[in-house]
Image (cartoon, rainbow, N blue to C red):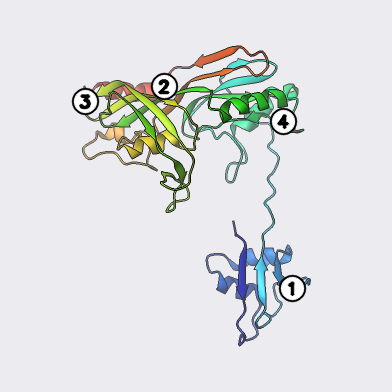
Amino acid sequence: MIENLTVTAPEDISKIRLDKFLAESFPEYSRNQFIHLIEAGAVQIVGQKITLSPDDKVVAGATYTIIPPEPVEPDPEPENIPLDIVYEDADLLVVNKPAGLVVHPGAGNWTGTLVNALLYHCGDSLSGINGVKRPGIVHRIDKDTSGLLVVAKNDKAHVGLAKQFEVHSIQRTYDAFVWGLTPESGRIEENIGRSSTNRQKMAIVKVGGKPAITHFERVGAYGITASHIKCHLETGRTHQIRVHMTSIKHPLIGDDLYGNAPKGAPENIRSFSRQALHAGLLGFIHPITQKQMIFEVPLPKDLENLKIELEKLK
């Protein structure tokens, strides 16, 4: 997406079309992109209120601003996608999400998401979140992470669950298979923020970011090649376990974004197709009944198979 841009035309500029001038000024964007922006009224001359056209000649010394309109996101549509519903009542439901399923529609994933599936499954049982009939997503797990998610069906449940996540009172335990022999247990407290070198990644940051705390205990060891750990989250930052475990040199198996397999690692382990992470336990206070709710699901088949292969390394 094009960001807000500003450029001043040189005083000695020759007659040149506006769309061409902008494309030459900002070569990281295409001429067609600027044509669409000009036609949408997103390009203006500072201090003037005139409608511009792509073939207008650039005014020498004039300053042009490009302020793209906010993208309009399409409303998600119900889709008949099978779901593993662990629990459901009039106010909420708990889903065991498979790896590969995106939670919420977004750029590149407007269909085929958990939200699309929930809209189909819930139908008229949704009373609406903020006036819109759609499920209340109060937390997410990565596309390639499997496991438990709680989803609100109405505003009251949504607010009650969101407050619990805000004060970090939700119980969340993840199974992770990581490279190397970890300590028997540990606590990692490092702020996490967006990486300054790769916007797709999060990173440990010394300044800024958000506080993040992960506790882990080792429940299985496979020689010095790998470990099976349980991670308990005090906070829920984006990619928290993946970033924290990489920071202590024990990246998740299959997580090519944050860490590579060590030299000499068996090919059948290093080729595991996703980050080996599963949200196996979820606990919270029901926002309406105030009852303690705890749910637990076993490892999915791909992680069970990974565990079997790792057992052979002992």
Q: Residues within 10 Å of mark 2 (few under 14, many from 20)?
A: few
**Which residue lies under the disc numbered 2?**
301
Of tags 2 and 1, the one toward the viewer is 1
Of tags 3 and 1, the one toward the viewer is 1
**Which residue lies under the disc numbered 4?**
129
Residue 274 visible in this rendered orientation of the protein:
no
**Label 3 or label 1, whichever comes before in sequence order:** 1
**Which residue lies under the disc numbered 3?**
223
**Label 4 or label 3, whichever comes before in sequence order:** 4
Left or right side of 193 for 55: right
**Which residue lies under the disc numbered 1?**
47
- Spatial CA span between label 4 and label 1: 42 Å
Where residue 152 appears, as percent x and y from the top left, is 65, 25
Left or right side of 28 for 242: left
Residue at x-position 57% and y-position 45%: 108
For the residue pair 63 and 14, the one nearer the viewer reads as 63
- Spatial CA span between label 2 and label 4: 34 Å
Q: Residues within 10 Å of mark 1 (few under 14, many from 20)?
A: few
